Amino acid sequence: MLIMPETATCVVTFVLDTLILQQITSDGFDSGMQVPRTGSCCEIAGLTGDMSKRRAVIADRMVEILLHYTDRTLKKCPDQGKIQIMEQHFQDVVPVIVDYCLLLQRMDLLFNQIYDKMSENSVAKGIFLECLEPYILSDKLMGITPQVMKDLLLHFQDKNRLENLEACIVHMDITSLDIQQVVVLCWENRLYDAMIYVYNSGMNDFISPMEKLFKVIAPPLNAGKSLTDEQVVMGNKLLVYISCCLAGRAYPLGDIPEDLVPLVKNQVFEFLIRLHSAEGSVDEEVYPYVRTLLHFDTREFLNVLALTFEDFKNDKQAVEYQQRIVDILLKVMVENSDFTPSQVGCLFTFLARQLAKPNNTLFVNRTLFDQVLEFLCSPDDDSRHSERQQVLLELLQAGGIVQFEESRLIQMAEKAEFYQICEFMYERQLRYDKIIGCYLRDPLRKEEVFNYIHNILSMPGYSAEEKQLVWQKALDHIEELLVLSPGKAADLAAIHFSEQLESIISNLQDQFLLFQFLRSLLDPREGINQDLLHLPPCITEQFIELLCQYSPDQVLETLKVLECCRLEETIQITQKHQLHEASSYLLEKKGDIHGAFLVMLERLQSKLLVLTQDDESSAEPSLLENIEDTLMKTIALCQRNSHSLDQQQREALWFPLLEAMMSPQKSSGSSQCPHSESLKSLTMQVLNNMAAFIALPSILQRILQDPVYGKGKLGEIQGLVLGMLDTFNYEQTLLETTTSLLNHDLHWSLCNLRASVTRGLTPKQDYCCICLQQYKRRQETADEIIVFSCGHLYHSLCLLSKECGVVTKGLMRWMCYKCNSSSKGGKLSENFSELKKGTAASLAQMSSESVLDPQQIQAFDQLCRLNRGTSRLALLTELARGDKHGLLSVSHGDPATSSVFQNENFQLHLTPPPLAEE
């Protein structure tokens, strides 16, 4: 019978769990032993003897089962198919074997008999070694035999899983490793963490790893060459390793034994401050290790020392080391010129922070700080200017300012153009007005001066005297601010210098600068709140004058958005600079439509004259485009204003424009003018647009009255006339089609209205909704039956008793009591009481409270006449006639026989038909 591997695994797991449970219940194992993961529970009976014998029997039995399970795993391994199938097979069963060997604490069984069996199959051996990794990383499996460890190293190396191998090494018991083999392997494959771990844990050697790493990174650094990526990684690991050693932590994880911590710190310090390396050449410079670390990464090395100094408390030897290494740092960096200003600055920033501590024990000669200041502020050295300034600023902010004389520092900073240093010092002295000059002279931070001034003048925390000094300083430098940014300067002036604007404008001598300032100030598109400004109109006119000089193309668009300007003066300015479109816009805004038209017409005629006087066969495209653009603007002017003009005034606009477009064709003739086609096209645009405002007969009459065309030269305008006729035919066809559609829609609406009006009403019940009696009773002769479209039925006398009927103009108006009482919440009586008062009550109330004047009475009567529609009987009669004569047929005879639908005052008051409830 064939048993699947999964089934065998389950059976073995169940049996092993049962045996382990028996041992636990027999107190054969420690109380801290964990219960197997399968959780099987069974009670074993029949085992006799003492506890030790039972434990031995169970353990032997479990070992036999594990060995049998291992043999079966190897025998039942699929020997055919893909390699992935075999790997999956062993990945399923090997963890079970490892789990139970760990549970039984039989590492000898796992790494001897079972491993020997697994080694017979190369795939099984590889999977077995790989399955050990998670147990090693979780510290469940720390001791491995040297042979298995050797095979594990070779396997991971063959698989190129070096990172996994390194992670395993740093978790293993060093006694199980071949130290020489592991060190060689780690160094060849750049596994520096594992190499350091082997040296530290296996040999308590904390110096050799540093020596090996220094040998790699020191030569290129001393030669001034750039490091490779691999060398940078080594240098970073070296810094971290030194930091861990000086802090008492093991690398890469864990802690150094407490009894070794002082020894390790001393060894590392002694190594770093060695005068020469063990294999150094004759010309080697002093303190090579400190020098190498400073060249590699000055800031990070000093950070490592700063963290180490934090732990130096009440330790005399540590304090001595601290002072000694500081002296070495100063000797190495100050006495050599191969360090950059940034590196030197990092050193003195580090020293300033150490000296600023309250329990400081370091001593640094103040003369060295003066030397550093002169070095950083050297005016002869223009290189690394920003770097040197930033270094000095960090030094001052770290507390180094106490090491300098402030007046001398400011003098040297100004000489070196270190304006950020000057700002830092002036801010300490509360001389905020001086800082404005620092910003203006700093080419990298000029733009920030506006925000600085605004913040000082706006934010709290500054005295009135300080704000006044800043305000006066900004006013004194307003021209420099305008040169820097006219927009920002105008914004600043509008907020903080609104009362001095006229003085500022009058004092500006540079006209272009004044133009930029006024444009930023007065143009609403620049974003300045115009409510903050209180300038006289002459300033606006001065801006327009400058705008006409420096940016004439923007005049028209600017005039459209300017909120206040005097029209007469502005028109004179635009006419002075011959800006025709702007002048036309202002004249139109003034109300002089004819004057605005004449300006545009004159400009159009001048361009047409240039076109006709051109002797070349073809005109420039730009000239034709300019003529078309000017013509379109002139047509738009006429269209905008024709609605508010009478017929004579319209003709005074359109006919001169038409004459201007036709005159070049009349003077030169169609055969001689090379631009006749373009001019004809433009003339047709004029005719098409003016036809909406001028009657067609008037246009034709005006053309025929022309002396030129009155003598038989109609052929020249044949195209124009035919074009007008085509337009007329098109519009006539459009009108007829539209009228037909309207007639059809009106006929449909009236038919629906007739059907709705003539439809009978069906009452919902056969009794009155008020008295609840049958409607057939006829006790009172004056009683009538009233049926509403909603289906409710009433006696007329019942409705009158509920005040639901009122006489208006001789006709009785009824209202459904039930519908109105439910929708208006009981206000029916109030509404009808007001309605019953009639016109007499309304007039009495008006005479008592307020009297309408004659104009109001006339308007009220006109409103009543407009809302009075045609009677339904007349409509039905006309509809009956419509079947014979056509619904909307035009009557050219007696007006008395014309249909009511032809009356221009005819109106329909249509409502949707009532809904009949079932």
Image: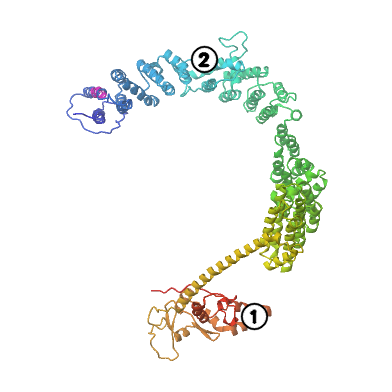
At x 79% / y 47%, what residue is drawn? 549
Closer to us: 497 or 308? 497
- Kind of residue at disc 2: Lys
- Residue 65 falls within the magenta-colored stretch: yes
Q: Is residue 78 visible?
A: yes
Q: Quadrant of the C terminus?
A: bottom left
> How many residues crowd mark 2 within 10 Å: few (<14), some (14–19), many (20+)?
few
Closer to us: 248 or 443? 443
Q: Are marks 2 and 1 in contact (CB under 8 Å)?
A: no
Residue 893 falls left or right of residue 25: right
Q: Is residue 22 visible?
A: no
Magenta-highlighted stretch: main secondary structure?
helix
When the figure is inspected, residue 353 is found, relative to residue 642, above or below; the finding is above
Residue 826 falls left or right of residue 27: right
At x 38% / y 88%, what residue is drawn? 777
Give the residue pinned by disc 2. 212
The image quadrant of residue 723 is bottom right
Give the CA distance from mark 2 to mark 1. Answer: 113 Å
Write down the region rendered in magenta.
63-73
When the figure is inspected, residue 452 is found, relative to residue 364, above or below; the finding is below
Horizontal and vertical percent position of residue 30: 30, 26
At x 65% / y 83%, what residue is drawn? 847
Residue 702 has which mark?
none
When the figure is inspected, residue 383 is found, relative to residue 279, above or below; the finding is below
- Residue 220 falls within the magenta-colored stretch: no
Name the element at disc 1: helix
Horizontal and vertical percent position of residue 778: 40, 90
Residue 849 has which mark?
1
- Kind of residue at disc 1: Glu
Mark 2 and mark 1 lie on one chain; the one further toward the N terminus is: 2
